Image: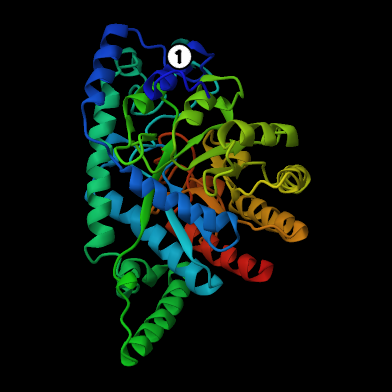
């Protein structure tokens, strides 16, 4: 890194490099004005919180903890409601309770929340009935409605994303520290779910065991404060570099740069060019960061990313999120893990079993088979078990609602059900029942691998 430049001058070097997946902003004066306004706003998260997460991810890399990362494929402004936020948080808390109790492992809880408003697209435009408009790139860029007005990229949407993220984080912090996340609420999280769901009934059995253990501890005179609150972190893909740069601040403690839009930000599969703008930007910030690795990633690529993004080999700094697909994970992942481990790097390995398993249903809906999602996770665990390394976590797109977007699972959604409640603005998500099913199955895999 060029130390002759100031920290903020270094931060801006990404502008001189090839940049992918950015909107074609039609009004550059408005873009500059929106970015300037964002620079005046308070941080959404604090550098010290990012450092705490970095320490937790270092424990994951050392085989001492497990990551549960989940949330919407693409957040929407309309989704910033108390009910929607509570529902997502509740699902993650239930999954974490299952993993912690059934797998006997500390769980690092990270939401795809309060910033996941932008989406990369395979094409810049979308055509319907002979009409071609800009592709929907998430609520941070343009509107979902297929109209000329809605699809124009508007940089002031990034300002609205900031305010939506702030409102979301405010409520999440209230829930996680104000009593809702108290482990004694383990039954209450399930109250609206157990009556008609096999996974809810199974969860209720675990909740009863947890409650019995808590009662025993209390009878022994032990009532740990740690059980009353939950450590919860926010994350999103750091896609819109104008937004991420505007929310990058100098930490008053250290003088180092931190992205204050989220605790954990990651580089996507479509923007991980080694000489591109995203890699350069991410190399300048001190947050814990992730990078998605698809099946085309070579072992040398993985080492190059480590050398560029974590040259000091700082524990917890870099997480590899692998998204190979169920049919490829057992063939493609071993070489990456062997190379990284052989070179002495210690990273957290997390499995994204969603993005490599998407296909189009006969109805035209994008969907995923729950069995494929599960099989990729199984393959991920098998590879790490075979190599003696640590399967560090899962990264899933989910919702707390009873949507019908992925087929299969305990409640057996079939193709004909997809149109019943298909509500995703982009990719299909696991519903609450499927998410709990996955948590139970992952807990079993973890116990077997330990």
Residue 233 at least partly seen:
yes
- Position of 163 relative to 195 (above/below): above
Under circle 1, the secondary element is: helix
Q: Is residue 299 left or right of residue 180?
A: right
Quarter assignment of residue 377: bottom right
Quadrant that contains the C terminus: bottom right
- Residue nearest the viewer, comparing 13 with 189: 13
Q: How many marks?
A: 1
In the rendered image, residue 323, in percent from the top left (x then y), is placed at: 62, 41
- Residue nearest the viewer, comparing 61 with 183: 61
Give the residue displayed 26% in from the left and 65% down from the top: 180
Quarter assignment of residue 412: bottom right
- Residue nearest the viewer, comparing 128 with 116: 116
**On the image, numbered disc 1 is attached to which residue?**
15
- Residue nearest the viewer, comparing 248 with 425: 248
Give the residue displayed 30% in from the left and 17% down from the top: 154
In the rendered image, residue 53, in percent from the top left (x then y), is placed at: 43, 51
């Amino acid at each position: 890194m060029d130390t002759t430049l100031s920290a903020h001058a270094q931060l801006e070097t990404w502008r001189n490099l090839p940049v992918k997946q950015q909107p074609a902003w039609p009004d550059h004066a408005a873009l500059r004005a929106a970015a300037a306004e964002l620079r005046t706003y308070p941080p959404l998260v604090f550098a010290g919180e990012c450092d705490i997460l970095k320490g937790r991810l270092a424990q994951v890399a050392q085989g001492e903890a497990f990551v549960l990362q989940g949330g919407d494929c693409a957040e929407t402004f309309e989704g910033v409601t108390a009910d929607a936020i509570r529902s997502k948080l509740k699902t993650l808390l239930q999954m974490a309770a299952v993993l912690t109790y059934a797998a006997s492992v500390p769980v690092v809880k990270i939401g795809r929340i309060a910033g996941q408003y932008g989406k990369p697209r395979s094409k810049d435009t979308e055509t319907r009935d002979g009409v071609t408009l800009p592709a929907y790139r998430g609520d941070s860029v343009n509107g979902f409605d297929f109209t000329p007005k809605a699809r124009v990229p508007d940089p002031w949407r990034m300002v609205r994303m900031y305010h939506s993220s702030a409102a979301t984080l405010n409520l999440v912090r209230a829930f996680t520290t104000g009593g809702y996340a108290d482990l004694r609420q383990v039954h209450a999280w399930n109250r609206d779910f157990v009556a008609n769901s096999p996974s809810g009934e199974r969860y209720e059995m675990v909740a009863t065991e947890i409650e019995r253990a808590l009662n025993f501890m209390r009878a022994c005179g032990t009532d740990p404060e740690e059980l009353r609150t939950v450590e919860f972190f926010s994350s999103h893909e750091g896609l819109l570099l104008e937004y991420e740069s505007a929310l990058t601040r100098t930490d008053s403690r250290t003088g180092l740069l931190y992205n204050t839009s989220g605790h954990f930000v990651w580089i996507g599969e479509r923007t991980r060019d080694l000489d591109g703008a995203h890699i350069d930007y991410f190399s300048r910030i001190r947050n814990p960061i992730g990078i998605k690795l698809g099946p085309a990633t070579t072992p040398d690529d993985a080492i190059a990313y480590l050398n560029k993004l974590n040259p000091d080999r700082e524990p917890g700094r870099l997480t590899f999120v692998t998204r190979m697909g169920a049919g490829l994970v057992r063939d493609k992942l071993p070489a990456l893990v062997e190379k990284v481990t052989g070179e002495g790097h210690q990273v957290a390995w997390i499995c994204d079993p969603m993005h490599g398993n998407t296909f189009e249903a006969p109805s035209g809906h994008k969907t995923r088979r729950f069995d494929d999602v599960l099989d990729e996770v199984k393959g991920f665990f098998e590879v790490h078990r075979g190599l003696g390394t640590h399967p560090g976590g899962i990264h899933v797109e989910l919702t707390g609602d009873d949507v019908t977007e992925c087929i299969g699972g305990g409640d057996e959604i079939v193709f004909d059900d997809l149109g019943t409640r298909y509500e995703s603005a982009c990719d299909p998500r696991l519903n609450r029942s499927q998410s709990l099913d996955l948590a139970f199955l992952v807990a079993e895999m973890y116990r077997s691998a330990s």
